[in-house]
Amino acid sequence: MKIARVFPRVTKATPDDDMCFFTPPPLLTMPEIDEVHVSCVFTYDRGKAEELAYQWGVAGVPVKIGGPAYDDPAEGDFVPGRYLKKGYVITSRGCNNHCWFCSAWKREGKLRELPIMPGWNVLDNNLLQCSEQHIRDVFHMLSQQKERPVFTGGLEAKQLQPWHCELLREAKPRRMYFAYDTPDDYEPLVEAGKMLQAAVFNPRGHVLSCYCLVGYQGDTFDAATERMEQTIRAGFMPYAMLYRDQSGKVDTDWRRFQREWLRPALVSHMFGEVWNNADQ
């Protein structure tokens, strides 16, 4: 079956093959298509996604609309290259945590392991909650890839164990991301930093990275800045992740704060200052 995939927004992970579209159907050179899948990630893009679904439907092609924005539970197996660019891979769905700001557990339910497909950028919600055999199989798959792995989906510090660190050391990842979202994440992050540094990961190499949630109700710029600096002291490069509700609206001051903490030059400078002070 020839499936066209239509996306309301382009991201780094969006596929870019000839059967991917980001606009209404072409008027003169309509490709041969059996079905159209409109895939929407963000709830605030639903309006555009529905408009695209209508426009493709008018062209006379069967249309389905779904994706995370529609609470799609993603019940099937992961198909490389279909809704994510080739190289991106998901080996498990769901999560056993119930974080208030995260929709993964609400949408996909408890963690379940999937057949492992090839790829190098791992996007699992919580890979370290998987069984030991599954995790070892994922790392074996990664060892067969030409690209050095990246763990973009995030690794949970509370789950990290020494044998995970050994697998990570052997895999030589380009980047791995942890998370500091709530106060109870901090002490596990510190311990994870110690374990990873013992496994010969140098914080100054910036392989160790950490998403830091900012801008949620009750957050302050001083508190968020302190969390970013705590992240550095734990040995991780911080990446500010701005909280958004379903409307997608964000405060302009918080957007400015996030952008400042995503500027490589500034963050590297802050990392050096905070890390050097921590050493003294």
Image: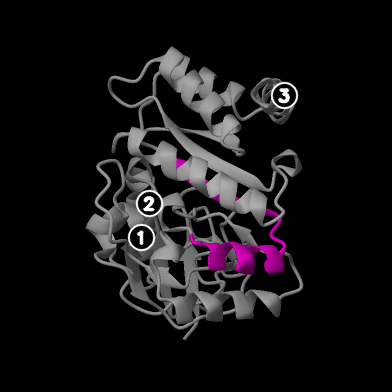
Q: Nearer the viewer, residue 103 or 209?
A: 209
Q: Could you say where residue 264 lies in the image, as x and y percent from the top left?
A: 71, 31
Circles 2 and 3: CB atoms closer than 8 Å:
no
For disc 2, the neighbor class at 10 Å (few under 14, some 14 to 19, many from 20) is: many
Q: Which residues are magenta?
A: 161-180
Per the model, the C-alpha gap separating discs 2 and 1 is 10 Å
Q: Secondary structure at mark 3?
A: helix
Q: Could you say where residue 70 lies in the image, as x and y percent from the top left?
A: 28, 56
Q: Residue at x 69, y 76 (%)?
A: 143
Q: Which mark is residue 198?
A: none
Disc 3 residue type (three-letter) = Asn
Residue 57 on the magenta segment = no
Q: Residue at x 27, y 57 (%)?
A: 105
- Front tag of 3 and 1: 3
Number of numbered tags placed on the structure image: 3
- Residue 109 occupies quadrant: bottom left
Residue carrying label 2: 49
Q: Residue at x 44, y 15 (%)?
A: 221
Q: Could you say where residue 13 lies in the image, as x and y percent from the top left?
A: 57, 56
Specify which label sits upstream in the sequence, 2 or 3. 2
Per the model, the C-alpha gap separating discs 2 and 3 is 48 Å
Q: Nearer the viewer, residue 23 or 170?
A: 170
Disc 1 residue type (three-letter) = Gly
Q: Does 251 sit left or right of 166 as displayed?
A: left
Residue carrying label 3: 276
Per the model, the C-alpha gap separating discs 3 and 1 is 44 Å
Specify which label sits upstream in the sequence, 3 or 1. 1
Q: Secondary structure at mark 2?
A: helix
